[in-house]
């Protein structure tokens, strides 16, 4: 429950008497537990867990350091604790809370305080980092094995399923997000859904995938070309994306702004005349969610910190023709970064 | 896009000029499409899709009958369409929308209208029903094969993984929720997380599982006893739960209130003196979400309608000792119900 203590420290610094937490990744971050109906009121010293009757014994067993309140609604339960304990300034997260619940909490005197838990989640502590690292290793290893068996005539979906099968063999617990295998013109759609299309010779395949390990995720993309001699345009685009990724990664370091990394990748692509075909951010944080802060996009002022885990994933998409994207998940360090997506 | 038309009909009846839809299962229901950042404004006649730049081409290809608006924020985009098209009364769902977004939409003049799409989702149209049916068949078939291989010495987790493997072999696309295999005293926790505990002889195993097929889900629970002669208490409890499920199912019929079905199961358990050990509702709707309306719990006044798909799942949990739960997913019909969770 180290993260619970970290949040309690943050509450004291922010002069908050408590914080209501209801969103699944925040709950898992704090307690390694989540089930429908489970919610927390974290005070500066004590924590209350609100649960439906059917979770009572389980939460008592699996979530230490909490007072378990069963069978009352979250809003009524929070209000009662606030009265009983004299908590005055209690927050909820307006960027995560459901509108109706947020309104009801406001009526009980709570205040919207955005992103408090997310801020802690952005810098990975030891346990989180070990899990992300493992998820990254699982997916990179799976790719190494599957890539040798990718050939014309297979469907996108069969390749996606095989990759997911390899995740499980390596101890992965599922997928971090829907596996993307996008072949030929489909590769020009960054978030194509793998379908029954047959892979063809002399076409590229974009594969974007990640595995899940103890709630944590990985994210990586590789672009392959099926066939012996890729046409010059493909080779050119691939090289630009490769260079763009390298330029982004080169700027990755604690203290640098997230927008600076984006600029590294984006300028490289722009200078080659493909700026308008790079239609997304350069990267994002990865952890309990596949997309979490920081955002590595144009103008993002957020300072990177050591212990953040982010992707660098520039791409060029030529509509109706093909696309190339290259992505790794990396750990930000004081000196630079370490690539986690390797076998 | 039949469901989009159904919603537009409902808008006309409710005298709403439009409805903002952002929650994933509602979006899938309406368009069979969902990706981060995709949202709809459904008008009485036209529909607008708001997407990030990277989804533009994909939404144009995969979501017909929509005007695609790329690269503007949802709130600004909705406000612009409302002005341009003269839409006045436009809703958002306060039970699904994020607080901050709901507040911003309110400032643009939108009004909270709860559960409009959910109401449509509760009665399964042909396509939805076929998918749920398939998900049910997949999980029931998988169970039949796995049950023969369950024996003392295996871990809970290995049985859960094997079940999930069988789902995939049958064309399932994943799990409807985290598979529960709860053995011995763990079976007394309704939502136990499968762990490394070894199954033992002369102990019960509760298995609660479901598969995913084209976004739709199934839900079923079986309780087995490992060993030749279950002790009298287990036999007694099992028989009561069996009878309680039968009594619930017997009352299932279009026109009956959801609470009436709960009463059927609950009274049976209460009469045998185990009322306080039945610590959850008797059932719930199943579809794009594993728990959706109607709720089959005490006092639930909602009338069941033909085409609803619900679970009936009474259980008795003796803390520290063992539990028994039996669950099927059923289709409500005019005459009664049909069990979908069979191979």
Image: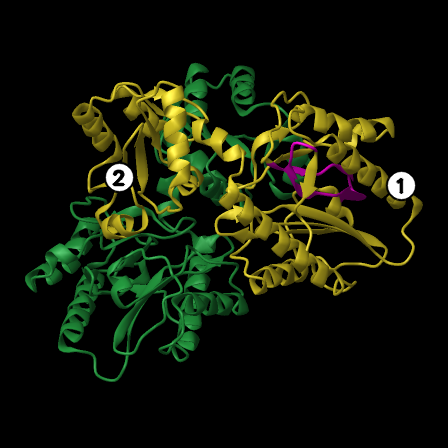
Chain colours: A yellow, B green
Q: Mark 2 — on which chain does it sit?
A: A
Seen at 81% across and 43% down, the residue is A321
Q: Mark 1 — on which chain does it sit?
A: A
Q: Earlier in the sequence, mark 2 or mark 1?
A: 2
Q: What range is drawn magenta here?
A: A309-335
**What secondary structure predominates along the stretch shown in magenta?**
strand
Query: Residue beneath label 1, please?
Result: A236
Q: Is residue B210 left or right of residue B332?
A: right
Residue A298: x %, y % from top left: 68, 23
What separation in Å lies between label 2 and label 1 (alpha carbons)?
A: 57 Å
Seen at 35% across and 47% down, the residue is A35
How many C-alpha atoms fall within 10 Å of the one at disc 2: few (<14), some, or many (≥20)?
Answer: many
Can residue A119 be spotted in the picture?
yes
Residue A289: x %, y % from top left: 52, 41
Q: Give SS at disc 1.
A: helix
How many C-alpha atoms fall within 10 Å of the one at disc 1: few (<14), some, or many (≥20)?
Answer: few
| The C terminus of chain A: image quadrant | bottom right
Query: Residue beneath label 2, please?
Result: A50
- Residue B122's label in the rendered image is none
């Amino acid at each position: 429950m180290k993260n619970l203590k970290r949040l309690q420290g943050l509450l004291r610094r922010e002069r908050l008497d408590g914080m209501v937490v209801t969103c699944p990744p925040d709950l898992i971050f704090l307690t390694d537990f989540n089930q429908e109906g489970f919610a927390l009121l974290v005070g500066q010293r004590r924590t209350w867990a609100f649960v439906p009757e059917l979770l009572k014994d389980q939460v008592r067993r699996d979530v230490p350091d909490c007072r378990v309140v069963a069978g009352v609604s979250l809003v009524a339960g929070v209000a009662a604790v606030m009265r009983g304990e004299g908590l005055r300034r209690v927050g909820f997260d307006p960027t995560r809370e459901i509108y109706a619940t947020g309104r009801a909490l406001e009526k009980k005197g709570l205040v919207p305080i955005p992103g408090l838990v997310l801020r802690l989640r952005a810098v990975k502590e030891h346990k989180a980092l070990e899990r992300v690292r493992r998820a990254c290793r699982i997916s990179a290893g799976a790719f190494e094995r599957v890539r040798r068996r990718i050939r014309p005539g297979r469907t996108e979906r069969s390749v996606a399923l095989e990759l997911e099968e390899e995740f499980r063999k390596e101890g992965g617990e599922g997928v971090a997000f829907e596996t993307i295998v996008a072949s030929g013109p489909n590769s020009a759609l960054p978030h194509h859904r793998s379908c029954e299309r047959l892979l063809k010779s002399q076409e590229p395949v974009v594969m974007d995938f990640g595995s899940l390990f103890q709630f944590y995720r990985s994210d990586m993309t590789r672009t392959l070309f099926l066939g012996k001699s890729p046409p010059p345009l493909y080779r050119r685009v691939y090289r630009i994306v490769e260079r763009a990724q390298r330029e982004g990664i080169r700027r990755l370091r604690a203290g640098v702004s997230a927008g600076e990394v984006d600029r590294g990748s984006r300028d490289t692509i722009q200078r080659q005349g493909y700026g308008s075909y790079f239609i997304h951010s350069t990267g994002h944080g990865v952890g309990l969610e596949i997309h979490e802060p920081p955002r590595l996009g144009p103008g993002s002022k957020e300072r990177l910190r050591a212990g953040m885990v982010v992707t660098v994933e520039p791409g060029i998409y030529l509509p109706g023709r093909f696309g190339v994207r290259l992505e790794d998940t990396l750990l930000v360090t004081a000196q630079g970064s370490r690539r986690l997506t390797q076998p």
